Image (spheres, helix red, strand yellow):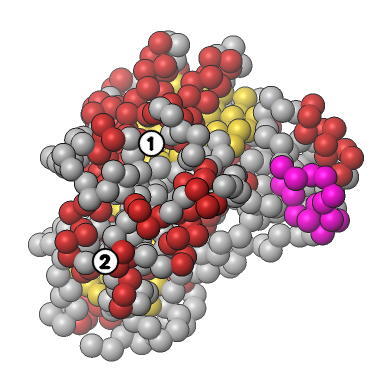
Amino acid sequence: MSDKKDKSKKGKAPHPPQKDENLLSRRNFIGGAIAGMGSAGLMAGTTKTSKKKESEMPIWSGDLKTTTKQSPRIPMTSKPNGLNMIVIIADTWRADHLGCYGSTRIKTPYLDKLAKDSVLFEDANAEGLPTIPCRTVYHTGKSVLPESKWQPLPDDAVTFAEVLQKHGVTTGFIVDTYHHFKPGYNFHRGFDSWQWVRGQETDRWKSGPKEKFDPKKHMPAHLWNERYDNNMRQYMMNTQDRKSEEDYFSAGSCSAAVNWLEQNTGNKPFMLWIDMFDPHEPWDAPQRFQKMYRDEYPYERYIFGYGVRNKYNSGANQNIRPDDLPVIKDLYAAEVTFSDYCIGRLLKKVEDLRLKDDTIIVFSTDHGTHLGEQEYVQKSPPLLNACVTHIPLIIKHPDKSFAGKRVAALVSAVDFMPTFLPLLGIDDVKTMDGQNMWKLVTGQLPSIHDNVYTVFQNFGAIHNLDWHYFQHIRGNKPGEGPCLYNLKTDKKQTKNVIREFPKVAKDLRNRLQNHLKIEIPPLRL
């Protein structure tokens, strides 16, 4: 967000979830779920469920829960302009792993093709991280700083889907990012239909046979630990029935999106939100995509996922070794290319259904990941640089005059909803913290932010067109900070120049503190 808005209330933590007073009874839950199988999955294990466990169940049908605090009223002075929107969020996608963002190695032909017909934002940045705080920002247009807490969707928030639903727009939610559907999280709020594609990562989808799978056969011995074993065993159980590429989760989500579009072309205007977990770990793409990057891997099925941590968090016997990095990078590249392929099939269906002339298409992610930078692998708060904070953002508008434009000005994840609503003709919602970044595209404004901010656990960053600065904002573990990058000479953020520019670092540190409205550790060089 811009420094101009530092005096707003955005520094407050999201309102804590209220006790649910409208959960369905066990008897009504079963009956309602059976009646609503077309738009939601049944929860397993409903028999002999204790009242405590029952109260933690997600609400799959019937009315959404009520709260003791009334949500702000949704204004109705605007009228939708008739355009549809498809939003595609693909988790953990590094911007520099797209051809349209400069990659010459990673194969992403379908998104690159989309970018040629779209507006590409060159300097889009994450705000609250990781997965769930980011989705809260996307769905509410509200900042989650400084806490960036992992928690359910706030009861008193006005969501993108709720606004559209209130205005008569048909809304659909297709998700394999399983965190959305943890008990009480309610990210499906306001959607007319929602579908959870089960089984990603450690989703407790299948419970056996545990003895059939041995993660040690799929990873180097020096990376093994108990957490890795438990995580990958769950993942292997979830994928035990996989027979073809169609059975991969990202393929399943895109196929479900295709079906939704086929069924809802008569329900215009519509908004379909697709949230894919890939290319998030585990990196386990189909073989033909892996072979695009190397002929042979150390294992027939090399699975890399959570459990192995970076040098800052891991024990000496669990560190990534230098000779691991080339393989890990290729596994991630294959996951990216496979995700691009799945999205390409969805985009082809948009063309086949003749939706291009009245549908806005958005592609983005929540954050990137580290791939060996300063020996870090996987997204790592102690190295809060562009590998994690820089996100791709592509918006295709039916108006072809916007095709091929590139926007260099700063934008933030908190600007998504304040941009999407006006693009659909709704410009009277005033509960959001972000700005309408489409004004940069039309030339109405040269910029909307002087600085943008990101918080990930105990670390915070401030970023502008010239500098990127990060440091720890809580506790006493500094990670790789305080760190200052000169973007005029070092766009890839490889050299810490804090000792060369101490005054710049001090100024950015003070701006970061003022924006977060908390006391952060002093700058020590």
Residue at screen point 53% across, 19% down: 259
Q: Is residue 486 visible?
A: no
Q: Which residue extends farthest left?
A: 489
Q: Secondary structure at mark 2?
A: loop
Q: Which residues are magenta?
A: 44-58
Q: Nearer the viewer, mark 2 or mark 1?
A: 2
Residue 152 sits in quarter = bottom right
Answer yes or no: do the residues labelled 2 and 1 have beta carbons within 8 Å? no
Reading the image, the residue beneath label 1 is 363
- Magenta stretch encompasses residue 286: no
Residue 176: give x, y in percent of width and height: 52, 40
Q: Secondary structure at mark 1?
A: strand
- Magenta stretch encompasses residue 54: yes
Residue at screen point 88% across, 45% down: 25
Residue type pointed to by label 2: Ile
Q: Nearer the viewer, residue 339 or 453?
A: 339
Residue 415 is left or right of residue 390, and the answer is: right
Residue 215: give x, y in percent of width and height: 41, 55
Location of residue 501 with respect to 414 vertically, above or below? below
Residue type pointed to by label 1: Phe
Q: Which mark is residue 320?
A: 2
Residue 285 is left or right of residue 145, and the answer is: left
Location of residue 501 with respect to 352 vertically, above or below? below
